[in-house]
Amino acid sequence: MRKLILAATLLLASSAFAKDVEHAFQSVIARGGIQRVVIDIPAGSFTIRNGGATQLGLSGISSRDYDGPNEREWAQRVVNDTSVEFVVKGAEVVVRRKFGPDAKSWRAQKFSGLDLRLDLPPGMDVEFDTTAGEINMAGDFGDINADLRAGEIHVTVPKARVRELNASCRVGEVHTNLGNEMIEREGLFPGKTHFFNAAGKSHVNLHVTAGEVHVTLEV
């Protein structure tokens, strides 16, 4: 599976001649009464770690390829107007893309990439409304829900916090380290790994239609 993903990545990179433009962004908000984070971004690369107890932070890079010097200026304007924002809705905050005037077109939004890092207070619930990409989470979180059509999920959380874990894929690989046991599943319909701990509190549900799921429950 890794070889197939690498081959596809190399093919895409070669077709774009490795030319791209980038724009960095960041934002911080006070936690207040926020208990849950919903990442409403269709595709991208997401790194999530624990930060301070009183605030949420995001930082990242928007990028896109361009074809030749004539398109470079337009592409730079697009990424300069593409970022990510927090939208607070009571006890929930939605993390979503933000587009300025130069990034309003379908073409501008469709082919721009996002590499995002979130720093969240410990114990916060996280849900992904995401179709494709790579998720890398490590730290102390509440409930975690992620269901990708294509991509990779890497999650490392304290074993004592997890009440129930479900990790699965339809085509690909599921690797689960339970601390005292390794469970490896690969192939077509490889099945679901299930773990239950009556003393835990959080529910972790991870699924990829095509790709890989890697989970480590730290003792």
Image (cartoon, grey):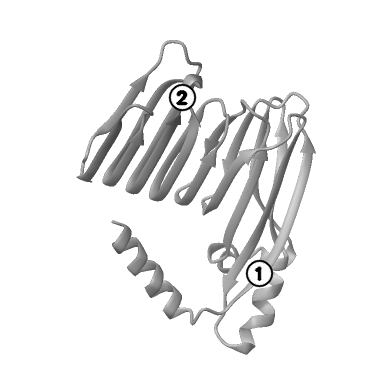
| Name of the residue lying farthest toward the top | 198
Q: Determine crowd level at label 2: few under 14, some 14-19, many 20+ residues with C-alpha closer than 10 A.
A: many
Which numbered circle lies on residue 45? none
Extreme residue toward the bottom, this view: 69
Mark pair 2, 1: CA separation: 38 Å
Left-right relation of 129 to 105: left
Q: Position of residue 24 (x, y in %)?
A: 71, 62
What SS does tag 2 mark?
helix
- Residue 151: % across, % down: 40, 52
Q: Which residue is mark 1?
A: 22
Q: Is residue 17 above or below residue 41?
A: below
Residues at marks 2 and 1 touching, judged by CB atoms closer than 8 Å: no
Indicate the position of residue 121 as horizontal and vertical percent values.
Answer: 68, 31
Kindly identify the amino acid type of the residue bearing the numbered disc 1: Glu
The residue at 32%/45% (across/down) is: 209
What is the secondary structure assignment of the residue under circle 1?
strand
In which image quadrant can residue 118 be found? top right
- Tell me the kind of residue under disc 2: Lys
Q: Which residue is rendered at x = 53% and y = 66% of the image?
A: 111
Mark earlier in primary sequence (2, 1):
1
The nearer-to-camera label among 2 and 1 is: 2
Q: Which residue is mark 2?
A: 159
Q: Is residue 49 above or below residue 23?
A: above
* Residue at 57% in and 34% down: 139
Q: Residues within 10 Å of mark 1 (few under 14, many from 20)?
A: some
The one of 205 and 69 positioned closer to us in this rendering: 205
On the rendered image, what quadrant is the N terminus found in?
Answer: bottom left
Q: Position of residue 29 (x, y in %)?
A: 78, 39
The number of callouts visible is 2
- 19 vs 196, left or right, is right
